[in-house]
């Protein structure tokens, strides 16, 4: 498979390792919770990771996730996020409400 531009534009990555995430995986849930904490500062509650993909690159793993959140009135929302997790840090790259 040909190399493609990185999600953050820092170089080229082989995306042949693209895999669907397992929404019930505790590690995937932890990353989803991290996104909600970083973006919503307690205004929305994490409900679940609905789906997404992961792939390796730039010394770690990218996670493109669809996350379900809930507000204090019980309304739910789906948000999208891209996270890069390396051995030294977990970094939110992109988030869309």
Image (tube, grey):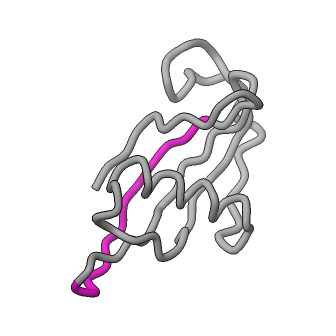
Instruction: From the viewer's side, name the closer residue of 72 and 4.
Output: 72
Point out the image quarter for the N terminus.
top right
Can you give x and y, in whole percent of width and height, for residue 94 in the image? 40, 38
Can you give x and y, in whole percent of width and height, for residue 37 in the image? 44, 54
User: Is 35 above or below relative to 7?
Assistant: below
Q: How many marks?
A: 0
- In this image, 34 relative to 89: left or right? left
Instruction: From the viewer's side, name the closer residue of 82 and 31.
Output: 31
77 magenta-colored:
yes
Which residue is situated farthest in the top direction here?
Answer: 11
Q: Is residue 96 visible?
A: yes
Can you give x and y, in whole percent of width and height, for residue 80 in the image? 41, 54
- Prevalent SS, magenta region: strand
Which residue is situated farthest in the bottom direction here?
Answer: 74
- The image quadrant that residue 57 belongs to is top right
What residue appears at the point 69 percent right and 22 percent down from the top-left corner?
A: 58
Q: Is residue 1 visible?
A: no
- In this image, 40 relative to 22: left or right? left
Which residue is situated farthest in the left direction here?
Answer: 73
What residue appears at the point 57 percent right and 58 percent down from the top-left corner?
A: 52
User: Is 12 above or below relative to 71?
Assistant: above
- The image quadrant that residue 60 belongs to is top right
- The image quadrant that residue 41 belongs to is bottom left
8 magenta-colored:
no
Point out the image quarter for the C terminus.
bottom left
The region drawn magenta spans: 73-84
User: Is 47 above or below relative to 58?
Assistant: below
- In this image, 1 relative to 28: left or right? right
User: Is 72 above or below relative to 95?
Assistant: below
What residue appears at the point 70 percent right and 37 percent down from the top-left corner?
A: 61
Can you give x and y, in whole percent of width and height, for residue 14 in the image? 72, 27
What residue appears at the point 49 percent right and 43 percent down from the top-left corner?
A: 82
């Amino acid at each position: 498979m040909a190399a493609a531009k990185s999600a953050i534009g820092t170089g080229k990555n082989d995306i042949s390792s693209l895999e669907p995430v397992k929404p019930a995986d505790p590690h995937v849930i932890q990353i989803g919770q991290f996104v909600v904490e970083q973006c919503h500062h307690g205004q929305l509650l994490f409900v679940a990771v609905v789906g997404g993909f992961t792939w390796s690159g730039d010394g770690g793993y990218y996670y493109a996730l669809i996350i379900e959140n809930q507000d204090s009135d019980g309304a739910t929302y789906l948000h999208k996020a891209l996270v890069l997790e390396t051995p030294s840090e977990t970094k939110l790259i992109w988030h869309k409400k």
